[in-house]
Image: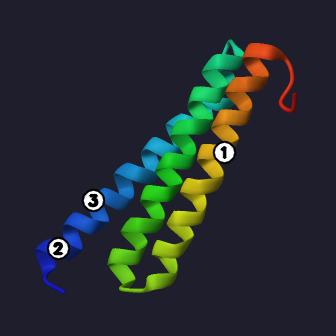
Amino acid sequence: MTTVLELAIGFVLVCVILSMVFCAVRLVRGPTAQDRVLALDTLWMCAMLLAVVLGLRFGSQVYFEAAMLIALTGFVSSIALAKFLLRGEIIE
């Protein structure tokens, strides 16, 4: 791997981890439930991106499969939380 690519991946890792920290702060301090749900959505997207970047860094397929699982569960949980906030129930 070239040094420029290693530096770019390192910079991306730092940026993603920093954005995860900001999302965690918003998740804890969010004044409303909608803010917390939005922070949780952004947090799982950042976790998925972190898995993809680690897959690029280490060249392993396992990280890409983990990113796919994170994306699927994150999408389903986002829909469930939005439905709960709108109607107060998840299963009709």
Q: Are marks 2 and 1 in contact (CB under 8 Å)?
A: no
User: Tag 3: Cα neighbours inside 10 Å, few (<14), some, or many (≥20)?
Assistant: few
Vertical placement of residue 46 versus 35, above or below: below
Residue 17: x %, y % from top left:
46, 52
Q: Are marks 3 and 1 in contact (CB under 8 Å)?
A: no
Q: Name the amino acid, label 3.
A: Phe
Q: Earlier in the sequence, mark 2 or mark 3?
A: 2
Farthest residue, direction front: 92
Give the left or right position of residue 62, taking residue 80 as reference.
left
State which mark lies toward you, 3 or 1.
1
What residue is drawn where x is 35% and y is 50%? 15
What residue is drawn where x is 65% and y is 28%? 37
Q: Which mark is residue 76?
A: 1
Give the left or right position of residue 39, taking residue 31 as reference.
left
Please state, as top left, top right, bottom left or bottom right, where the N terminus lies in the image.
Answer: bottom left
Please state, as top left, top right, bottom left or bottom right, where the C terminus lies in the image.
Answer: top right
Residue 88: x %, y % from top left:
85, 17
Of residues 82 and 18, the one nearer the viewer is: 82
State which mark lies toward you, 2 or 1.
1
**SS at mark 1?**
helix
What is the CA distance from the residue labelled 3 to the residue labelled 1?
A: 30 Å
**SS at mark 2?**
helix
Q: Name the amino acid, label 2.
A: Leu
User: Tag 1: Cα neighbours inside 10 Å, few (<14), some, or many (≥20)?
Assistant: few
Q: Earlier in the sequence, mark 3 or mark 1?
A: 3
Residue 61: x %, y % from top left:
44, 84
Label 2: which residue? Answer: 5
User: Tag 2: Cα neighbours inside 10 Å, few (<14), some, or many (≥20)?
Assistant: few
What is the CA distance from the residue labelled 2 to the residue labelled 3?
A: 10 Å
What is the CA distance from the residue labelled 2 to the residue labelled 1?
A: 34 Å
Q: Earlier in the sequence, mark 2 or mark 1?
A: 2
